[in-house]
Image: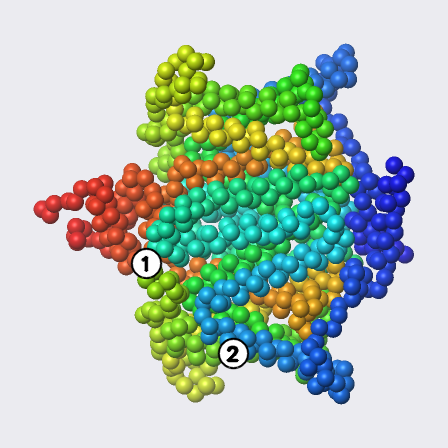
């Protein structure tokens, strides 16, 4: 008994010691190391440290944007893989913070269980996505068909196994820590995994629904920073003292403008506006279709107020550009709340950055904190305003019903169509 | 001056034994019972209280079943709210966070949002005919996801704006605590209601199996218990576990047999828009029609019958009871671990002798999800009313093309006779 008591005391001492250490480095046992590649270091060695930081950030930003364009060029499959990798890295970063906060590296099983839960939840979501988009492929291959039919049951069984393993792994002295890590893992999964799958759904709707929102958030980030740098005076929120109202408003207007221009350029190309489909014969992704109404130029009357400013009476725009205004507005007004949330989180756990993966920028999560809300918003927006349910998916679901249910639905639909006059005397056609 | 945050961070990181205990809950046994039992010794008194309250709960349960589906839905909703309240209160006590600005309002607000979202997704499907008639409701249904998302976002932004310098960590903890609690209590209560709509038998048999397993495992453990089962719950024994398993399977068989006779339990619950009530009337599905099964030779010797008349549902009840006995208890162990971790004896003191509502329902949660997944995987495919709702939202041209596809499919399968042009 005495031994364990002294052990506890030692733990307690270590904890309080590290808490009372420096403000930022408190919980992280290792100060963040300088990750900048040697090349950059040497090239910028003679500049002052402030400008050096600027240059490092600038170069890395350009590198990331270039990389973004390259993977867009490479196509949907690569994009999906990249989204997957980003998701795994974000999960890893947040879980590592949890370990650091709770000094819980030594908890039995816990690292294995976290990765196992990540696998389970991904399996569940990918199964749902794959079943929808790869329907004909799945129906053809026998093992895939069974996996898809009993998909929910299999996912649930896998998750339950993890849950039971967790219960069996509870160790007397560490109950609280283990429950904390369990909760931490689940919240992280909720944030990271669901949103990355929403991004992939958006992607399948059309690459433009993936590119425009992400670009708007990035643009807002950069523009708000620039406006804040040059004109910034009134602080915006106590959480992030560097943000200013001037930056916020300037960023808003620039992002809306940027969104309009980017959408105009992209709407012209089929490879961006068409839904991604899986071609069974060539076993690859194709983006080829008749551009939907949303991406066909239309004449709009300019409201009288703007006529004097702009000098035109009508303008030719894509309807999608109107939607892009909604997307940019969300990116500028609500997106930053994701950033404030992440700032609050970092202050709460006394960390400067989520990780030190990207030199000058911090971790992957630092770049993606504003994107998360955006992904959900775009998905909800598309589901609510752009398209209704997917007719082919409905037909698939219909085919799995029992005959009496099918008949009931058919008759109700028929009555509805007759009611609306869509199916009149042509009833038997 | 010691920062509150610093002190509580230390609290977090100390090992379990250093954390001060939460004061034991007060005794809420009604006076009547206390006087009636004042003559007995403390142990028997506890037994009697538990026994009486158990009977009271079971009677209450039967009463509500008699009152119908709507009352059951309300009951499930009330239990969900109470469970949520219990878990959140524990969170407040653990983190001494009663004084956090806004937090209580935000927790209730999130509960409301998530409930609104789930009710719109599930229950609204069943009221399709009711909804079609009213314009405002149609608008709410059509943009349901968007409205729910906006409501949630408002809560999220309020949370961010409410972050106060000294309490960041606590606020994030409570935020996470709220979300995990919502995930556990609200999603599962909605799954329970969906099971209910499938047929009351899908609601009654699982819940009764879990209760039966609880009681019989306790009784077997009491009389024959010797080998401890798991360190988390020292009172559980292997004898209780196995005895409970077999009793629950037998109970499930017999109980399903009785329920399967009555249309009231077997039929999917439907909302009749003319009478504005729930009706449970239908042709009993195949699952609830007696069939002859050949008894396997192994059991023939034991039972002496060659064939037996059973409902196919009883086979499914076997799966349900097995899950209730083997995996259900893990929910109980999880709750025990949780109570030990936060050094509380019971979730609350709502029910005398039993603790809080969560104490009674901890095993039920996994069961509800299992039954739902089981139904969607093995019993029926996707929900027909939901499918219908989505069909009705489509554009007229899409509806027409879908109609044509469905028609040709049905004619192909011989379900629909091709009509003759007159």
Which percent across, then down, holds residue A329?
53, 70
Which percent across, then down, holds residue B376?
43, 40
At 55% from the left and 30% from the top, the residue drawn is B324
Mark 1 touches mark 2? (CB < 8 Å): no
Which percent across, then down, holds residue B273?
36, 38
Which residue is the extreme one toward the left? B422
At 40% from the left and 57% from the top, the residue drawn is A133
Tell me: residue B394, above or below residue A409.
below
Q: Secondary structure at mark 1?
A: loop
For residue A45, which quarter of the picture?
Answer: bottom right
Q: Residues within 10 Å of mark 1 (few under 14, many from 20)?
A: few
Give the distance between the C-alpha atoms of the residues marked 1 and 2, in whole angstroms.
32 Å
Q: Secondary structure at mark 2?
A: helix
Which percent across, then down, holds residue B75?
54, 33
The numbered dot on residue A258 is 2
Instruction: From the viewer's side, name the closer residue of B149 and A429.
Output: A429
The numbered dot on residue A416 is none
Label 1 is found on which chain of the structure?
A: B
Quadrant, the N terminus of chain B: bottom right
Q: Is residue A420 visible?
A: no
At 52% from the left and 43% from the top, the residue drawn is A156
Q: Residues within 10 Å of mark 2 (few under 14, many from 20)?
A: many
| Mark 1 lies on residue | B395
For residue B299, which quarter of the picture?
Answer: top left
Both marks 1 and 2 on one chain: no
């Amino acid at each position: 008994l005495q031994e364990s008591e002294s052990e506890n005391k030692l733990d307690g001492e270590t904890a309080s010691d590290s808490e009372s250490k420096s403000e930022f480095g408190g919980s992280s046992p290792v100060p963040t190391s300088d990750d900048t590649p040697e090349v950059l270091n040497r090239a910028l060695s003679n500049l002052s440290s402030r400008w050096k930081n600027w240059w490092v950030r600038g170069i890395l930003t350009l590198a990331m944007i270039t990389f973004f364009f390259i993977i867009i060029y490479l196509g949907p499959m690569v994009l999906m893989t990249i989204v997957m990798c980003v998701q795994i890295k974000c999960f890893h970063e947040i879980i590592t913070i949890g370990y650091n906060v709770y000094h819980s590296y030594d908890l039995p099983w816990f690292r294995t269980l976290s990765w196992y839960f990540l696998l389970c939840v991904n399996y569940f979501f990918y199964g749902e996505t794959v079943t929808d988009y790869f329907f004909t492929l799945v129906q053809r291959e026998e093992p895939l068909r069974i996996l898809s039919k009993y998909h929910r049951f299999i996912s649930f069984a896998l998750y339950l196994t993890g849950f039971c393993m967790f219960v069996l792994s509870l160790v007397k002295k560490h109950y609280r820590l283990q429950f904390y890590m369990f909760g931490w893992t689940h919240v992280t999964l909720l944030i990271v995994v669901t949103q990355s799958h929403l991004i992939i759904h958006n992607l399948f709707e059309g690459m433009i629904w993936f590119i425009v929102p992400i670009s708007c958030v990035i643009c807002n980030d950069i523009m708000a920073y620039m406006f804040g740098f040059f004109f910034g005076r009134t602080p915006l929120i106590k959480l992030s003292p560097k943000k200013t109202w001037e930056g916020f408003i300037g960023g808003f207007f620039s992002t809306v403008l940027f969104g309009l221009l980017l959408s105009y350029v992209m709407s012209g190309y089929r490879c961006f506006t068409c839904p991604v489909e899986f071609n069974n014969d060539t076993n690859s992704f194709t983006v080829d279709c008749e551009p939907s109404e949303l991406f066909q130029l239309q004449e709009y009357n300019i409201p009288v107020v703007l006529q004097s400013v702009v000098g035109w009476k009508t303008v030719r725009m894509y309807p999608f550009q109107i939607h892009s205004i909604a997307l940019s507005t969300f990116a500028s007004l609500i997106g930053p709340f994701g950033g404030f949330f992440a700032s609050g989180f970092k202050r709460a756990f006394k960390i400067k950055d989520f990780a030190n993966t990207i030199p000058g920028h911090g971790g992957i999560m630092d770049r993606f904190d504003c994107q998360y809300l955006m992904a959900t918003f775009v998905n909800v927006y598309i589901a609510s305003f752009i398209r209704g349910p997917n007719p082919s998916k409905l037909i698939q679901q219909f085919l799995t019903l029992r005959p009496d249910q099918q008949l009931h639905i058919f008759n109700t639909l028929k009555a509805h169509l007759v009611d609306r006059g869509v199916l009149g005397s042509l009833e038997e056609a | 001056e010691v920062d509150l945050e610093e002190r509580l961070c230390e609290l977090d990181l100390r090992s379990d034994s250093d954390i001060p205990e939460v004061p034991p809950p007060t005794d809420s046994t009604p006076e009547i019972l206390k006087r009636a039992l004042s003559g007995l010794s403390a142990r028997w008194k506890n037994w009697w209280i538990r026994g009486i309250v158990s009977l009271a709960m079971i009677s209450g349960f039967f009463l509500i079943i008699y009152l119908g589906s709507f009352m059951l839905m309300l009951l499930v909703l009330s239990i969900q709210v109470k469970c949520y309240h219990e878990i959140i209160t524990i969170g407040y006590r653990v983190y001494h966070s009663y004084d956090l600005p806004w937090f209580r309002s935000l927790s209730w607000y999130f509960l409301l949002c998530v409930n609104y979202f789930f009710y719109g997704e599930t229950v609204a499907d069943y009221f399709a005919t009711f909804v079609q008639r009213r314009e405002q409701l149609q608008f709410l249904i059509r943009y349901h996801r968007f409205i729910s998302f906006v409501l949630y976002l408002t809560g999220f932004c309020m949370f961010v704006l409410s972050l106060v310098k000294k309490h960041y960590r606590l606020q994030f903890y409570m935020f996470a605590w709220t979300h995990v609690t919502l995930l556990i209590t609200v999603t599962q209560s909605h799954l329970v209601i969906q099971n209910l709509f499938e047929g009351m038998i899908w609601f009654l048999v699982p819940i009764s199996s879990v209760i039966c397993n609880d009681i019989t495992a306790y009784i077997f453990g009491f009389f024959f218990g010797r080998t401890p089962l798991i360190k988390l719950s020292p009172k559980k024994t292997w004898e209780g576990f196995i005895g409970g398993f077999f009793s629950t399977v037998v109970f499930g068989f017999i109980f399903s047999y009785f329920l399967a006779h009555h249309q009231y339990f077997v039929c999917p619950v439907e909302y009749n828009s003319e009478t504005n009530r729930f009706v449970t009337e239908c042709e009993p599905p195949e699952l609830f029609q007696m069939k002859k099964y050949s008894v396997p030779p192994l059991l023939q010797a034991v039972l002496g019958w060659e064939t037996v008349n059973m409902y196919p549902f009883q086979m499914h009840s076997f799966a349900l009871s097995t899950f209730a006995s083997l995996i259900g208890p893990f929910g109980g162990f999880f709750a025990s671990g949780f109570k030990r971790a936060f050094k509380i004896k019971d979730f609350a003191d709502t029910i005398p002798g039993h603790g809080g509502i969560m104490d009674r329902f901890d095993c039920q949660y996994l069961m509800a999800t299992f039954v739902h997944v089981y139904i969607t995987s093995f019993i029926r495919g996707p929900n027909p009313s939901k499918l219908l709702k989505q069909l009705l939202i489509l554009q007229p041209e899409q509806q027409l093309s879908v109609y044509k596809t469905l028609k040709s499919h049905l004619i192909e399968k011989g379900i629909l006779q091709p009509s003759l042009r007159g």
